[in-house]
Image (cartoon, rainbow, N blue to C red):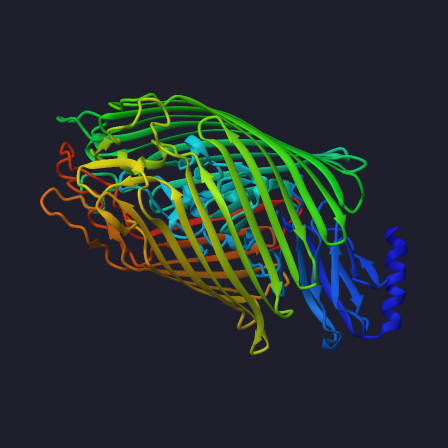
Amino acid sequence: MKYIIALIASISIWNIGQAQVKGVVLDDEGNPAYALVYYKGTQLGTVTNEEGEFSIGIPKEAKWLMITSTGHYSDSLFIDPGLGTIREVKFNLRENSTLGTIHIDEHDGGTHINGKDPQTFQVMNEKELCKAACCSLSESFETNGSVDASFTDGITGTRQIKMLGLDGKYTQILFDNMPAVRGISSTLGLSFLPGPWINSISIAKGAGSVVHGYEGVTGQINVAHKAATMKENLFLNMYASSAGRYETNILSNQAIGEKWNYQLQAHGSSSQKLYDTNSDGFLDNPLFKNYLLRNAWQYTGAKGLRGEYGFSYGQFNTESGQINYYRNQGVVPFTPWISNSQTEHAEFTAKTGYMFDEHGHKSLGSQINIGYNKQVAQYGYRYYEGIQKSARINLLFANEMAEGYNITAGLSAKADDYRESLTSFIGNLNRVETTYGVFGELNANPTERLQIVAGMRADENNLYGLILTPRIHARYSITEKTSVKISSGKAYRSPQMVVDHLSALAGNRTWNLPPNATTEYPFGFQMEEAVNSGIVLVHNTKLFHRTATFTIDAFHTNFQNQLVADYETAGTFSLYNLSGKSFANAVQTDFTFSPIKRSEIRLAYRWLDAQTTYTAGLKERPLVAKHRVFINLAYATKENAKSQKWNFDFTARWLGSQRLANQSDYVVASNIYSPAYWTLNAQVSFFAKANLEFYAGGENLTGYMIHHPIHLSENPSSEFFDASQVYGPMFGANYYVGLRWRIGQATKTE
């Protein structure tokens, strides 16, 4: 059938003349996709070749070019017949939710601002991730202007992300379109995915899809594993830094017969050097030894049956604290303040889907997660132990009811069994939380320029009762180059009392609960509930005959219920239900421009206003920079006859002042602000061959660092000893080298 369509299309193109659209269709992993390309309301169509490429004429009546592919959502592009030949048009089709990211651009940059998807996606592909070392997921946002990465405290070295002015716990993290990094792993779980294992990261600001649950106050981040899309048989990544960090990643991809593919992934990392550059008596960087293994399988059967299955296991061991304890191998004439944690992680995932027709108009799928997380940790005189056993299943049915109207509906169930304990904490942290839900989402194109995605889900939670989650997204194409998107929706979150607030354990702050709190979980604390609304304007244009994209977005997050973490009183940490206002306003502008071939400039400015009502009144949330400037420059030389080339990348970030919570027992300081500062990162990559890349770079090249990140570091036995107020780097410049070696069929990075 596809050969008949191609023959008809080629004859049609011959008759039309020279006006054509030329382009390529890829899936959301960057692989060529077999797709049907046709004009809406006409008989003119063609199919893509093995490389995903197509060429199709432009009839006089042309308006919308439609792209459809089995197992993916359709896409479209407005065509002006008077433009003549249109080259280098790229479509990336979003995988349908049964087995989720779409973008269209006219250049192959590392990050794509998507003007076509109502759910506000920004996509970081493998090319973008290779601009920095990206040792783990938490470190993969160094070249991104929308997500911040920082440390939770000045001792443990735990990294966190922030989006729209709120902590990463309010962002739903998905691995391969399935919820991950939640519960006990909500903070440390960002280390469970090494950077070299990642193929792409899709960022959705604001309310996300109801298909994935009721979480995601500030948005969703979907991380796609690299192994399933590898074109090479073996991938090797090695890394070493001046901070004493060493890493190795090995990924293998093999086919078994015609229907099965499997991947083996191995990660090992270690850091054992002792550094105290600010002479405060504490290690600047924690010592660690980590390893992680993963085995993934893909099945492609007859008659539309597909499956993806994976199992991962890892152990992460970290320790930090007073440096003399480690210099003297644990023998010191005093009781040292040290921190250590041993984390064990195991997870099984399964996705199975069946498509009833070759165009994917009707499909049925299931998603299953089974996880185990255990963490044993010491924070000075306090000990924490937590075990989480979890299971989740999602059943989905997708159907195209009519042209331009698709619906996804399903059922979900999840259960989490927590066993937790914390020294000196009065109260039972153990609990079993179960949730059963039903959901539906309509994706409608009532007109050629308007697309609406409306979703609703209802969940019954055994701890918090009935949860209703309405969400809506809409996109309107003002012109073929300008679109506006709006979104609004509710989100909820079950607060994790200990792991959400690890920074409060990095010191000797006394934990306080409300006087009327019960001794049984959830201690009278309400489920966190917020409404997020936003608007986005995306404009694509030509500047000096080169591609340029301008976006501006504004989001407002308003909490109805929130577990307030109060650091405002020196020596204490309090938890209580919100009584008053809590909100975050975020406005960001982005400009992307390619001034010359193989180059890209990305500029971003963001303004934040995040405030919460504490017992002392409405205040700015601590450790939130109101102003942020982001600059990223990239250039690649032309590849020579030996497939050799150079890549140059430079990133600069400026963070404005941040409010700090009070740490002093001498002064009641309600308005202490950190200084503003710049950080600079740079990397140079040399491709000795198309499949062999050497890279070297530096982080924090300005050498800026907080010289006293730990309050009263000279007296760790004091009740006011505290490391929770960290607003910037704690280590000077860090230099690194590494290699990426693709063995087998080489993958070129254009």
Residue depicted at x 60% and y 45%: 455
Residue depicted at x 63% and y 70%: 479
480 sits left or right of 317 in the view: right
716 sits left or right of 124 in the view: left
- Of residues 365 and 304, the one nearer the viewer is 365
Residue depicted at x 76% and y 53%: 403
Residue depicted at x 65% and y 44%: 744
Residue 87 lies, with reference to residue 463, above or below; the image says: below
137 sits left or right of 705 in the view: right
Image coords of residue 669 (percent x, y): 15, 50
- Of residues 341 and 285, the one nearer the viewer is 341
395 sits left or right of 189 in the view: right
Q: Quadrant of residue 700?
A: bottom left
| Residue 272 visible in the picture | no
Q: Pick the quarter of the image with the C terminus.
A: bottom right
| Residue 408 visible in the picture | yes
- Of residues 402 and 468, the one nearer the viewer is 468
